[in-house]
Structures are given as structure tokens and as C-alpha cells.
Image (cartoon, helix red, strand yellow):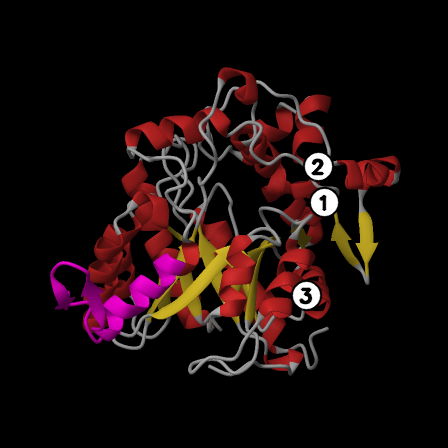
Amino acid sequence: MTAQHDPSTTPLGVLDVIAISEGQTPGEAIADSLAVARHAEQAGYGRYWLTEHHLNEGIAGSAITTLLPVFAERTQRIRIGTAATLLGNYHLVQVAEAFGALSALYPGRIDLGLGRSGSIPAVSPESAAAPLVPAPDDRANLDAPQGNRIVDGLVVPPKRDLFQGLRKRFALSQRLFRRIAGDTAGLEEAVAELRALFAGTSVDEDAGPYVAPPANGARPELWVHGSSAGISARVAGRLGLPFGSNYHVSPATTLEAVAEYRRHFRPSEGLREPYVIVAADALAADTESEARRLAEGYGHWVASIRAPEGRGAIPYPDPERAAAQPLSPAELERVRDRLDTRFTGAPEQVVEGLSTLRRVTGADELLVTTTAHAVADRVRSFELLAEAWSRTPAVG
């Protein structure tokens, strides 16, 4: 893989959380996403990645190693992968064997994105109830209109405690997955072990050299994903791996995360220059007013994810019902950063926003995540965006 610097050739991929809409079963939501994947492939998207979320009433994307082969089987060319496989939820040999099998069945099409989400200290009742307090360096930003900075046309919101409403959820997840404190602290060592399993060079101090088919000899494309200028960005850079950053989840920290990755990058056998993919939330429709109408439920959905009660995502709301029940001022403030950084409108408007994101971050690829109540609206959004993107002579 070599970095692409021509903005007119920046590929688009899809990131899917497999949101369950109001009135749907999880099976129906998965079937809808399979239909979206087929349409995305036909529209020319290069990747279809699934997220890993657990214990959310409104999200069916949890058992991703079970779902990946189904998505790969229902498509023909598009790359299928994860963004990300959460290492603390698995033993490394399980990850290697699963993705080794996928790589054998679908050669040249499998991506393995690695993430550390959930690697937080044990949660106490006091920390779970802690109020959202902006970091000292960011308090000044809250005095600006809406608390946002504009960096070369890109909205960069103030930092916030993304885990405020999720601490109880993480604590429950840790118990159910039998997680222990610090179980993802050694990210660099974990990646090295995975590489050894795929290369067939693993050595145990007692058993000696060993191999783990079908991991042995497999070549899934390895990525590291992170939302901040922390361990994940530095490890991806030091190991010469491509890096994924989540503007759609943490728009306040994307620029510094990408900069940290590039600062620590060392060329590797597979990658001579830094390579970055940035995920963004977007919804396109034939007109701006139609896109705004379809987007009505988005704020309610994000507000449920961030709610202090920590119950997780609700089923994705019907836009008419959501419009009839506006968010409270407190809820609106809770999701302001996500609303301000979602690209919503006619195709040309969405392309303009994504072009700015690509230019400011220097992304080599972009991932688009699109949630809507009706699958037809998701499919239409991806088709409109792909068409508009392809006829843009010089993106950015």
C-alpha cells in the first residue's frame, strides 16, 4: 500500500454500525445492511467495514466475526473488514484464526482493524456519576459561538467527556466479557503477536515454535484505529501500519490524532509513507430539505448513546416522530458536536464537507457512515454521494 496524495482519487468506503430502526428486529437490520453492502459495491465504494458495539438495544453490529463472512459472501469485490475489532474482548489467537480463515476464503478482500476501546480503569459509582467537565485547555473554546473552532473550513468542536454516559455500559461489558484492568495496555505487543501468528513465527517459552492454522500465512490488511493522540496513534505510526481516525465519534480530537500518528510514523515493509483513513457521518438526499427531514432522528439516537443513564443506543427513530418530539436543551447540548460535524444535505453539499475533511486531515481515504430510519434512504444517500464524488474533478 502506498499513500495517495491526489485528492481527486481519494477513495470512499462505508462504515456500518448496523443500526436497528424502530419497529425492526435485529435480523431485519442485518438484512438491510447486507442490501446496503451490495449497493455500495455496485456504486464503487472500496471498503465495507463493520463496527463492534455490544449491549445496545438499537445496534445489531456486535458479533462481527460471525457477520463478516456473510457480508463477504453476499458481495464480490469490495473489501470487508472491521473498524474495529476490540482486542480486550478476545484472545489474540482467536482473532488470528478467525481472520486467517476469512483471508483464506476471501483472499485479498479482508481488513482487520484493531482497537482498544473499553480499556478504562475499573468504574466506581463516583466516577460513573461524574459530571461532564471540559478539559482546562478547552474551556476557552466554549466561550466561542457553539464552542467550535473552524480550522481551514473544518468544524472542530471543543473536547468533551465522551464516556460520561457510557461508564456504566463499559462496566457491564467488562463484567460480561470478564475483562480485567489493563488487558489492552500492551497494544504494541499484541500487534506484534498477531503479526507473528500470521507469519508463522510464534514462539512460546515453554512449547517453543508453533503455528496456528489457518492464521499461518494469512495476509489480512492490518489497521490500527484510534480517536485521540494516544497509544493507538503512536503504535500505528511506530509499526508502520495504516491508521484510522473517527471524526464521526470524536471530531474534537481527529486532527491531533492524525498528527500524532504522522509524527511517530516509521516506514515498514508494507507501508513507506503514513496512510490515513478518516470516518465521517453523512446523509445525502435529492434536496437539502429532504436530507434535513430524514436526519431528524439522528440527534435523538446520539443523545441516547450519550445519556447519563448509560442504557446505550435506542432503535433509530422515525424522522416524523423525532420531529414531533424535539430534544431538550440539555440533550441538544449533549450532541451538539455530532450535529455540527455531520455532513447533511444535497449531494454537492455533502461532497463539499467531505472534501474539506479530506483536505484538512490529509486523509488518503474517507469512510462514510450513514444512519437513517429506512434502508432505501441509506442506499439512496450512498448512491447520490458516489455519483457526486466521482464527478468532482479535484476534491478539496
Q: How far is disc 3 from disc 2 in space, using C-alphas?
A: 21 Å
- In this rendering, is residue 269 above or below 60? below
Answer yes or no: do the residues labelled 3 and 2 have beta carbons within 8 Å? no
Badge nearest the viewer, 3 or 1: 3
Given residues 91 and 166, the one toward you in this image is: 91
Mark 2 packing: few (<14 Cα in 10 Å), some, or many (20+)?
Answer: some
Residue 216 counted in the magenta span: yes
Residue position marked by numbered label 2 in the rendering: 336
Residue 213 showing in the rendered view: no
Element at label 1: helix
In the image, the segment drawn in magenta is 189-218
Is 296 displayed left or right of 105 in the figure?
A: right
* Amino acid under disc 1: Asp
Above or below — where is 344 with respect to 55? Answer: below
Per the image, label 3 sits on a secondary structure element best described as helix
State if disc 2 and disc 1 touch (CB < 8 Å).
yes
Q: Residue at x 50, y 51 (%)?
A: 377
Instruction: Determine which residue is flagged by label 3.
Output: 361
Q: Which mark is residue 340?
A: 1
Q: Is residue 178 magenta?
A: no
Q: Nearer the viewer, residue 373 or 125?
A: 125
Asked whether 78 or 197 is in front, the reply is 197
Q: Quadrant of residue 26?
A: top left
- Mark 3 to mark 1: distance in Å? 17 Å
Tell me which label, 3 or 1, sits earlier in the chain: 1
Residue 168 in the image, given as x and y percentages of width and height:
46, 24
